[in-house]
Image (spheres, rainbow, N blue to C red):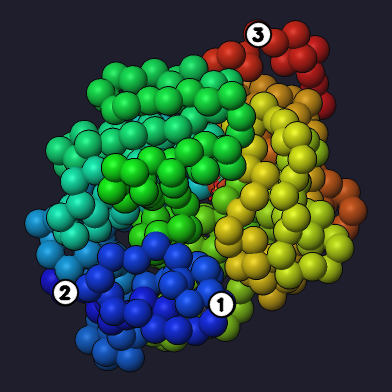
Amino acid sequence: MKSYLSHIECTLCGEIQNANHVHRLCPECGGVLYPRYDLKAAAKELDRKVFKDRHPSMWRYFELLPIIDPQNIVTLGEGFTPIFEISKVAKTLSCEKLFVKDESLNPTASFKARGLSAAVSKALEFGISKLTIPSAGNAAGAMTAYAAKAGIESYVFMPKDAPEANQKEVFISGAKLELIDGLISDAGKLSAQLANELDLFDVSTLKEPYRVEGKKTMGYEIAEQFDWSLPDAIIYPTGGGTGIVGMWKAFEEMESMGWIDKKRPKMFSVQSEGCAPIVKAFNDGKKHADPWENASTIAAGIRVPVAVADYLILQAVRESGGKALVVSDESMLSWMKSVASLEGMFFCPEGAATLAALKELLDDGFLSGSERILILNTGSGLKYLELVGMPEISKASN
Ligand SMILES: *Cc1c(COP(=O)(O)O)cnc(C)c1O
Ligand SMILES: [Zn+2]
């Protein structure tokens, strides 16, 4: 097996970089860098049918991932998560074809495993021995797990009110954990500072080119699992946006290889009322988002006041004909309860947010009940036990 990785390209100014060198943001303009592949050769030599017989992890798409030597793959079994139809929830919403991709079944119980498996593998390939990460929670748990497996030293900066499960998974892995009095954006500054001082590689999302490659595998899987015919709509809880831009990138790559047609799902970016920079920029018709002041939400994974890839998220949502929308924390708690009681799935609040958004989209007529709709449950509710037993959850009903 060989990777078709060819070069690194800036998504903002188009400048090209050598894929064999270590990069973070574009040295010319500070834009987000994407790995690019020789898709012409891949289209000729690679048949999408080959994946069927491969092992069920995201590494089944090795040719379209940025690792050169398969020996460098650091894996805990991430990806190829199931897609379920959730017809009882669908019935309460009066829609016909509702599916969930259940990312809670990833190692470390969230889809952050995908991005960090890719980034830590690439770090290993580059011979990097120390990593640092600012995280709202789940990214830290994933990074430290993969770093431990790879034998790479790791440092974490996380808000002190991040979910307890995230703090503990970092602690148990032996990583150096610093809890800070602030948000992920403040953690980002400290992480960058320490990276400079101690020569650590900072794996902040989209400030290095590889996490997005791990997350884009969701896009490949969705295509393969839906037999190469994408759903009509995808609803995604958005923090840094790595997942949504990753899926969008996967769709482009697959179209250029002739694996899927031109038709794209409408992409919906969901944020919380208490932290909605992307929604605000979407509604204001802006290309970039302003930092969100005093960000606050129970959905730790989307408590992200600043996203470097804001322009890529907004572009994907706009080009797809979707939209960005907010939901309340109460509605997330209420949907966590409904999904658990109707479908037996313990969603994270971010996953539940997609259902609250879907209800609004159906009520407003933005989506019709006959469309094929896919939501992402990005992590497990078991990582947010603090939320269960809050008075709101027992009061909540819908
Ligand atoms: C990080 C995270 C998100 C947001 O993901 P992005 O790709 O950064 O937008 C959503 N849900 C959960 C559970 C997360 O941990
Ligand atoms: Zn650039």
> Would residue 295 be visible to someone looking at this image?
yes
**Residue on which the image places disc 3:** 389
Judge left or right: residue 153 versus residue 301.
left
**Which amino acid type is marked by label 2?**
Lys
User: Does the image show residue 63?
Assistant: no
Q: As drawn, which residue projects farthest toward the right? A: 364
Q: Position of residue 290 (x, y in %)?
A: 75, 55
Q: Secondary structure at mark 3?
A: loop
Q: Nearer the viewer, residue 53 or 15?
A: 15
Give the CA distance from mark 3 to mark 2.
50 Å
Left or right of 13: which side holds 210? Answer: left
- In the image, which is nearer the foreground, mark 1 or mark 3? 1
Q: What residue do we see at 28% from left, 36% from top?
A: 154
Residue 49 circle label: none
* Residues packed near mark 3 inside 10 Å, few (<14), some (14 to 19) or many (20 plus): few
In this rendering, the answer to whether 184 lies above or below 118 is above
The alpha-carbon separation of the residues under discs 2 and 1 comes to: 28 Å
Residue 342 position, x and y percent, is 63, 27
Q: Residue 300, position in %: x, y? A: 60, 32
For label 1, being within 8 Å of ligand 2 is answered: yes
Sequence-wise first label, 1 or 3: 1
